[in-house]
Image (cartoon, rainbow, N blue to C red):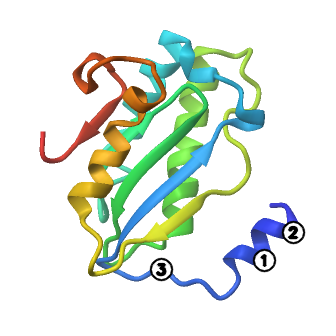
Amino acid sequence: MRPGHAALRRGRTSRPHQTYLVTFTTSERAPHFADIDAANTAARAIEDPRIWENSQLDAWVLMPDHWHGLISLGERDELSTLVQKLKTNVSRHVREARPEIARVWAVGFHDHALRAEESIADAARYIIRNPVERGLVRRVGDYPYWNAVWV
């Protein structure tokens, strides 16, 4: 991890039952997931139930060069460990399917703990509308690489 990332994480703690908006990017912002095979493989790996045994993935979207997720942290999970587990699982599966992708994710991630006054529904809408806002599709339902527990 680069020194800047370590400094950002210092002093931060994961809180059980807290909902976090999490974002991480592909290595060098490469559009790995513009490729249908890589995106399909990643989408299956993201929803692997072994990752989400204790925490819940409330909403997510896989963009060509980044991922957004809304995670409700469980009692036994640490956010950093859970994100690392997710990134590792996706990387392993993507590299098996697409060996030419040597490095899938960039180091680190950004997280924002939703405050009491912030709406989980608004955060989920932000996530799933990302492909529309970026001009990839006209309607949310036209984009295949997202999910939300409310759907």
Q: Is residue 58 visible?
A: no
The image shows residue 15, relative to residue 46, as above or below, that is: below
| Residue beneath the point at 55% across and 16% down | 34
* Circles 2 and 1: CB atoms closer than 8 Å: yes
Foreground tag (3 vs 1): 1
Task: Quadrant for residue 98, please give it.
Answer: top right
Q: Quadrant of the N terminus?
A: bottom right
Q: Residues within 10 Å of mark 2 (few under 14, many from 20)?
A: few
| Residue beneath the point at 23% across and 43% down | 148
| Residue beneath the point at 62% across and 57% down | 109
| Residue beneath the point at 41% across and 28% down | 131
Q: Mark 2 and mark 1: span between their CA atoms?
A: 6 Å
Label 2, secondary structure: give it.
helix
- Residue on which disc 1 sits: 7
The image shows residue 70, relative to residue 27, as above or below, that is: below
- Residue on which disc 2 sits: 3
- The amino acid beneath tag 2 is Pro
Q: Residues within 10 Å of mark 3 (few under 14, many from 20)?
A: some
Residue located farthest toward the left when viewing the structure as drawn? 151
Counting residues from the start of the chain, the first of labels 3 and 2 encountered is 2
